[in-house]
Amino acid sequence: MSDKAKKYIPWVWAGIIAGIIIVMAVCLVSGKKSGRQGHDIIIFGDSIVAYTQDENSLANLIARDTGLDVFDLSFGGTLMSYQDAGESLASYRNNLCMAAISGAIRADDYSLQINTHITDSATDYFSDRAGGFETIDIKKTDIVIIEQCVNDYHCAVPIGDRDSVSEFTYCGAMKKVVNDLRAVNPDIRIIILSPTMKWIDENTTAEDIDYGEGTFTDYVNAQRDMAEYLGVEYIDLTHIYDEPSEEFVVDGEAVVGFAYTVDGTHPNYYGRKTIAKTVADYLKES
């Protein structure tokens, strides 16, 4: 063998080794993707869904009431839309907003969601839950439930309308989310949940309170209208706490209104049971 030929031997081996590494990497990624699971239901939402993460979480109560597999990807404090980058908590709220999540689903890249570092209170479960993104397969999932509205209202995100395309508006973001999910799975059922009523105190609802871009009622009406426009299913939870409960009694009084909540916004056990039953009844009838 000539000296010239000998010079090329290390380069040949280097090429072979590089090729082996590339093949192994491709197999590793393919293996991870092939191990992903579809679910009967994946539920996305804010702290209305995520307030507890125990056996009596909303997702687990829905699973028990329906007998279906419900996978929880809800994160407290998050929105449907992107929030202005100058606002507080915008980083994690933007990375974990529903518009960002649907974009990640469409791109099949959850690195932004998984690598979001959060140190705010009541977010200790975020890291473990975000790891679940790598395990889901939307193509094999039957139903997606989305509960996102109340934080868009709290953060005074512009509402927009049916013609909105900006993901920094509630309606534009909702449109993007639905389009992204249908691009990945055209047959998936998409169910939008309205927020439950919000109370300022035990006797005052937030129906007519405006934080800058509209009242609670304005946001809920826009959500309902967009669901109709986009042809997705809609469950209206706004007034499910209005009637005194026949099942739950505390100190001799039937639970009603504010008493279904911890603080006027987040559902307590009675509230979660009532939401779960409403969702389960809807699914059984549809």
Image (cartoon, rainbow, N blue to C red):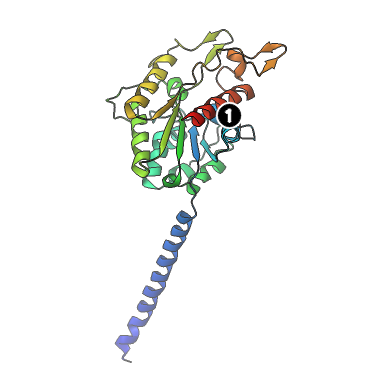
Q: Position of residue 154 (x, y in %)?
A: 46, 20
Q: Nearer the viewer, residue 153 or 180?
A: 180
Q: Which residue is rendered at x = 44% and y = 31% of the image?
A: 191
Q: Vertically, is 71 above or below 61?
A: below
Q: Nearer the viewer, residue 40 or 15?
A: 40
* Residue most extreme to the top: 203
On screen, residue 245 versus residue 14, left or right, reads right
Looking at the rendered structure, the secondary structure element under dot 1 is loop
On screen, residue 124 versus residue 185, left or right, reads right
Q: Position of residue 89 (x, y in %)?
A: 47, 30
Q: Position of residue 83 (x, y in %)?
A: 40, 29
Q: Amino acid at mark 1?
A: Tyr
Snapshot quadrant of residue 186: top left
Q: Which residue is rendered at x = 57% and y = 32% of the image?
A: 62
* Residue most extreme to the left: 163
Q: Quadrant of the N terminus?
A: bottom left
* Residue most extreme to the right: 251
On screen, residue 73 versus residue 85, left or right, reads right
Give the residue at mark 1.
51
